[in-house]
Image: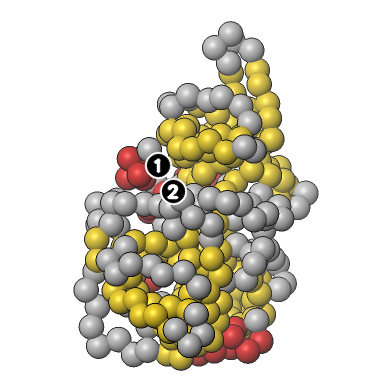
C-alpha cells in the first residue's frame, strides 16, 4: 500500500530519512470530538513521512502535527495518505504535510538531482547550531568521516565553517524482526565510467520481510557499491541500503539492485555488487 502512495504523498520528492522522533498528533473524530496522541516517526522527508500511532485513522483524514524544537513549538497541518502496515507497537501511516514550506522537521533536504555525484549520504548536524541536514558526501568527506566520524563544512545557518557529526535519533531504536516495506516503483539509471573508492564503512541492508542486516562496505562509487554480508541476496533482487551506517543514528535508505552475488566459502560470507536505483522522473 505504501508503494501506491509514494508518488502522491511527496515522499519521493526528497531523500527519505529513517529517523525517530516523538510527534503529537491531533484530529477531530467522526463524533466531532477532539483526539490527541503521541506518535513516533519512522521515516521523514521534505513533504511527508511515516508515523507509528496506536490509534485508528483513515485515508484522507486531516491531522495536526506538533513537536518541540528547543524552546520553539512547531505545528503543521497534514493528511493521512494510507495505512501501510500494522506492528505490535501500533499502526503505520504514510502522511503528507499540507504546508511543505513550514520546515516542520527542521531538516534541510537537498534537491534530488544533487545526489547524482554523491558517493554516500548521511543525516548530519552542525556542531554549533545543531541544525540537521541531509549531506551528500564526496570522496574527501567520506574518507574524513571514515577516520574521524565527522566532517568540516560550511553551515549556511551559522554562515561559518563548522564540524558536522552524524545526527542521532531522538528515540532509541530497537531491534525488530521485520523491516519496513520497500518501494517498488523504481528504474535503474545506467551509470558508466564511475571511479570506485575503497571505503571500509558499515552499511545497513533492508529487505522486505527480513531483519535489517549490518554489513561491511568494501567500495563505493557514484553508481553503486560492493559489500560483504552474512546473507545471500540473489542477483536482480531489490533491497535498500544506508551507507555509511551508525546504529542509532538517522539512516538514509536508498534502493539498490543486486547485480552480482558471490559466495566466499572460506569465511562463510557473500560478496555483493549493487547498483543504485532511482524512482521515475515524474515522482
Residue 181 numbered mark, or none: 2
Label 1 sits on a secondary structure element that is helix
Asked if residue 62 can be seen in this view, the reply is yes
Q: Is residue 11 left or right of residue 55?
A: left
**In the rendered structure, are the residues bearing label 2 and label 1 in contact, judged by CB atoms less than 8 Å apart?**
yes
- According to the image, what is the colour scheme of the structure? secondary structure
Label 2 sits on a secondary structure element that is loop
Q: Can you give x and y, in whole percent of width and height, for residue 21 in the image?
A: 66, 49
Furthest residue toward front: 265
Furthest residue toward top: 31
User: Measuring 78% from the left and 49% from the top, which residue is drawn there?
Assistant: 71
> Which image quadrant is residue 264 in?
bottom left
- In three-dimensional space, the C-alpha distance between marks 2 and 1, rounded to whole angstroms, equals 7 Å
> Which image quadrant is residue 168 in?
bottom right
Depth order, front residue of 191/239:
239
User: Measuring 37% from the left and 89% from the top, which residue is drawn there?
Assistant: 196
> Label 1 belongs to which residue?
2
Depth order, front residue of 31/1:
1
Q: Can you give x and y, in whole percent of width and height, for residue 212 in the image?
A: 53, 60
Asked if residue 99 can be seen in this view, the reply is no
The number of callouts visible is: 2
Depth order, front residue of 106/143:
143
User: Measuring 56% from the left and 24% from the top, which residue is drawn there?
Assistant: 56
Considering only order in the chain, which callout, 1 or 2, is on the residue closer to the N terminus? 1
Q: Is residue 80 left or right of residue 277?
A: right
Q: Where 214 sits versus 174, above or below?
A: below
Amino acid at each position: 500500500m505504501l508503494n501506491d502512495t509514494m508518488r502522491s504523498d511527496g515522499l519521493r520528492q526528497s531523500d527519505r530519512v529513517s529517523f525517530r522522533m516523538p510527534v503529537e498528533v491531533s484530529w477531530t473524530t467522526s463524533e466531532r470530538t477532539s483526539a490527541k496522541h503521541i506518535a513516533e516517526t519512522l521515516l521523514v522527508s521534505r513533504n511527508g513521512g511515516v508515523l507509528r500511532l496506536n490509534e485508528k485513522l483513515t485515508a484522507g483524514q486531516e491531522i495536526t502535527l506538533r513537536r518541540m524544537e528547543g524552546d520553539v513549538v512547531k505545528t503543521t497541518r497534514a493528511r493521512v495518505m494510507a495505512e501501510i502496515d500494522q506492528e505490535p507497537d501500533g499502526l503505520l501511516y504514510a502522511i503528507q504535510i499540507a504546508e511543505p514550506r513550514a520546515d516542520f522537521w527542521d531538516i534541510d533536504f537537498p534537491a534530488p538531482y544533487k545526489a547524482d555525484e554523491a558517493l554516500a549520504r548521511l543525516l548530519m548536524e552542525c556542531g554549533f547550531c545543531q541544525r540537521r541536514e541531509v549531506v551528500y558526501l564526496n570522496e574527501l568527506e567520506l574518507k574524513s568521516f571514515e577516520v574521524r566520524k565527522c566532517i568540516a563544512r560550511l553551515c549556511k545557518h551559522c554562515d561559518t565553517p563548522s564540524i558536522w557529526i552524524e545526527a542521532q535519533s531522538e528515540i532509541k531504536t530497537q531491534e525488530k524482526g521485520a523491516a519496513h516495506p520497500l518501494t517498488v516503483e523504481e528504474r535503474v539509471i545506467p551509470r558508466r565510467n564511475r571511479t570506485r573508492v575503497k571505503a571500509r564503512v558499515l552499511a545497513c541492508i533492508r529487505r522486505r520481510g527480513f531483519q535489517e542486516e549490518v554489513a561491511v562496505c568494501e567500495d563505493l562509487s557514484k553508481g553503486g557499491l560492493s559489500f560483504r554480508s552474512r546473507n545471500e541476496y540473489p542477483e536482480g533482487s531489490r533491497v535498500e541500503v544506508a551507507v555509511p551506517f551508525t546504529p542509532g543514528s538517522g539512516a538514509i535508505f536508498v534502493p539498490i539492485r543486486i547485480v552480482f552475488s558471490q559466495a566466499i566459502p572460506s569465511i562463510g560470507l557473500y560478496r555483493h555488487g549493487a547498483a543504485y536505483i532511482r524512482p521515475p522522473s515524474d515522482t
